[in-house]
Amino acid sequence: EAGVVQSPRYKIIEKKQPVAFWCNPISGHNTLYWYRQNLGQGPELLIRYENEEAVDDSQLPKDRFSAERLKGVDSTLKIQPAELGDSAVYLCASSSNRDFTYEQYFGPGTRLTVT
Amino acid sequence: AQTVTQSQPEMSVQEAETVTLSCTYDTSENNYYLFWYKQPPSRQMILVIRQEAYKQQNATENRFSVNFQKAAKSFSLKISDSQLGDTAMYFCAFSATSGTYKYIFGTGTRLKVLA
């Protein structure tokens, strides 16, 4: 079974430029999460989807961040314009609410460097 | 609001020895899960062990076990017979099983296993 796929793995951009991250969750997982992980810190939730609905986006900086999960499968997270403080690893995770384990499966992350 | 606290930023242990990582949490929920996730250097995060709050018996997975003290809101991870491959960041996490289902991670403990 394929795991959570993320691309790109690394991205270097200049500040004020746009950037987008893509995530494909494990097949059949209805819940998808985007996290931001700063160096030496734990993941912080940005947005959680149940199928195609964003059910928790309270931590998403909506002035510059946007996300979508069309058709309830893969998802894209966008930053426009990027700021120096956005440098971090962006993690995507997925889970199934049908197994009642509440375990999340993580992708390898996208390391973003804003210069 | 739920919080998860890991008070040990870094720890080290000799190979084959035993080490315990600490985690405390705060919640008003009655039903929840607690997790320990492992994030090896430059690799993706994986689940180590899971504990359901309604179970009094401590979870065990091979060399990994937890000491779950519900009244004290404490959830420590014991790694027995430490191996070099255990070197990683370890994150304690909390998930409510109702309401917002919000997942909260601690700040992590960097564990280094010494040869």
Image (cartoon, coloured by chain):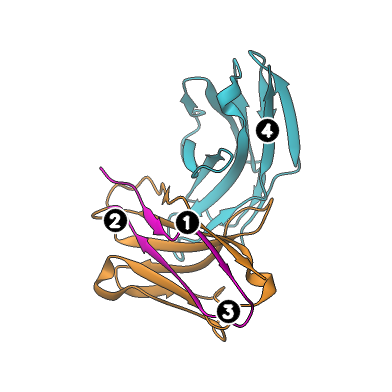
Q: Nearer the viewer, mark 4 or mark 2?
A: 4
Q: Gap between marks 4 and 2, in whole Å?
A: 31 Å
- Which chain is represented by orange in the image? A
Residue at x-position 54% and y-position 50%: B94
Task: Inspect the magenta stretch and tell me whether residue A10 lies in it.
Answer: yes
The residue that mark 1 highlights is: A9
B11 relative to A31, above or below: above
The circle on residue B111 is 4
Give the side of residue A73 with respect to residue B32, left or right.
left
Q: For marks 1 and 4, give the one nearer the viewer.
A: 1
SS at circle 1: loop
CA gap between label 2 and label 1 equals 22 Å
Magenta residues? A1-26
Identify the mark nearer the N-term, 2 or 1. Answer: 1
Q: Residue at x 71, y 22 (%)?
A: B13
Give yes or no for contact between labels 3 and 4 (Cβ–Cβ under 8 Å).
no
CA gap, disc 3 to disc 4? 32 Å
Element at label 4: strand
Give the residue number, with chain letter if any, for mark 3.
Answer: A61
Mark 3 or mark 1: which is in front?
A: 1
The amino acid beneath tag 1 is Arg
Labels 2 and 3 in the same subunit: yes
